[in-house]
Amino acid sequence: MESSIVDWTGVPHVVLIPWFGAGHTIPFLEIARRLAAEGIVITLVTTDRHVVEVRSLVGSMDLTSQGLPLRLLGLRDNMAHLSHYEWMEKEREDPEAQLNVVKLLQELIVDVGSPDSMKLRNVQPAAPPVCVLHDLFVPWAQLAAENLKIEKHMFYSSSASAMSCALQTRRLYQEGRIPITREMRNMVFTDIPGLPPIPALDLFSSFMDPVMYKWMSRHYFACQNADVVLINTYYDLEKPVLDALRNEVIAAPDAQIKFIYDIGPLLPESYVRRDRDDDILQQGSEETDPCILWLNTRPPSSVIYVSFGSMQTNSPPQLLEMALGLEASGSSFLWLVRPPDSPGMTAALGGPCSITEFLPSGFEDHVKERGMCYSGWAQQMRILKHPAIGGFFSHCGWNSTLEAVCAGVPILGWPFKAEQHLNCRLVFHVTTKPLVFCGHANLLLMCFCIKNCRIGLCIL
């Protein structure tokens, strides 16, 4: 992965620490690519288990062939046998494990900035890092940076609106307004900087669950301890929130954050700037992607693309309901479907798998003239830019939301968890493209929304 540069010791050096899941890792790799293209040495650090997935994504983004000063290292945590969730659970619950990952990260940061780095880590020598840039879900990186007296910068892979909520977590907790109990669910929050009044149910799902809140609050609190915060958004999309964050939040006398930067959308420049059909239909006989090949046979703006992200899987009843809704809608669709309770991104990277047993009997035969079900890893940005796409039935994860907005595709939102309800409501209020909001889906409502998504009917 390293370039042919021999001496990196006079070049600025940054350590980047992404987190699990494509929604976190892919934007981080785009940051790495952009910084490395400016000549900054990048050391990507992640857990031993995550290294395999990051290396796969690095390959799919073609970073290895660009000669960039970029290297990927594992933490040497000896926990590669654990799943991502088991790793997180151990780090969360085991104080010894917490101390160990901080110690391992400190050692790595020192090693990669040492003249002996080739011997210590088998990487080219580089200058000591000027900062550590870590994901929200790597709060332990802050302690390592503090111990080494280097700046700690946080990357937030979601919206500025969600960051505004995160930065209010401590205050809302002290005021007794979170966690949100059943009796409090009709509350409306009117004092989140830069946001319109927000119903309680549209805030973070972790605010509703005391157990999840206890874990997530650690990450939200860490936002306030960063020296710099980078957000995957852009000013025209979230102007009121970004203005409020800069004028009210970091301007406060006790604020530790020095700067908040909007650095998005972290998408390939060609994706943001080109017309929708560029690089889609011009591959001719060389095209091999099954989704694109199928879309090439469909009329313009005729297909609803259905996908709920790399980490989201649905229950068997939800899969059944969606299948029946898609069939009853009469609309053409491309459905990226995962088996229920599968490990999300890991299953997707493993290739297509059988999903027939989870769908209604005869479903695929009934819809074969107008619908395609696919269970492999899909090239979502190419799909959204395809002229045949007329709407996007989405979970409103932030990356999917940005990709749809930049492609000019209407969104039918079915948020599930995390900040997805907030993302869905944000896009409804700020985009010029129509959006259909389906907060609590059932068969009749889903069928109605799918049928009308392409004509811009808005439902709240």
Image (tube, rainbow, N blue to C red):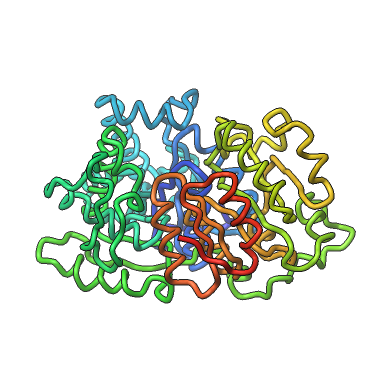
Q: Position of residue 121 (x, y in %)?
A: 45, 39
Left or right of 143: which side holds 304? right
Left or right of 137: which side holds 353? right
Q: Which quarter of the figure is the C terminus placed in?
A: bottom left
Q: Position of residue 17 (x, y in %)?
A: 41, 47
Q: Position of residue 215 (x, y in %)?
A: 29, 36
- Viewer-closest of 322 and 84: 322
Q: Position of residue 216 (x, y in %)?
A: 30, 41
Left or right of 99: which side holds 407? right
- Viewer-closest of 377 and 230: 377
- Viewer-closest of 374 and 94: 374
Q: Is residue 381 visible?
A: yes
Q: Residue at x 13, y 66 (%)?
A: 252
Residue 268 position by quadrant: bottom right
How many numbered markers are drawn?
0
The furthest residue to the right: 285
Q: Is residue 70 visible?
A: no
Does residue 452 sit above or below 278 in this rendering?
Answer: above
- Viewer-closest of 321 and 373: 321
Q: Residue at x 24, y 65 (%)?
A: 193
Does residue 258 sit above or below 176 in this rendering?
Answer: below
The furthest residue to the left: 253
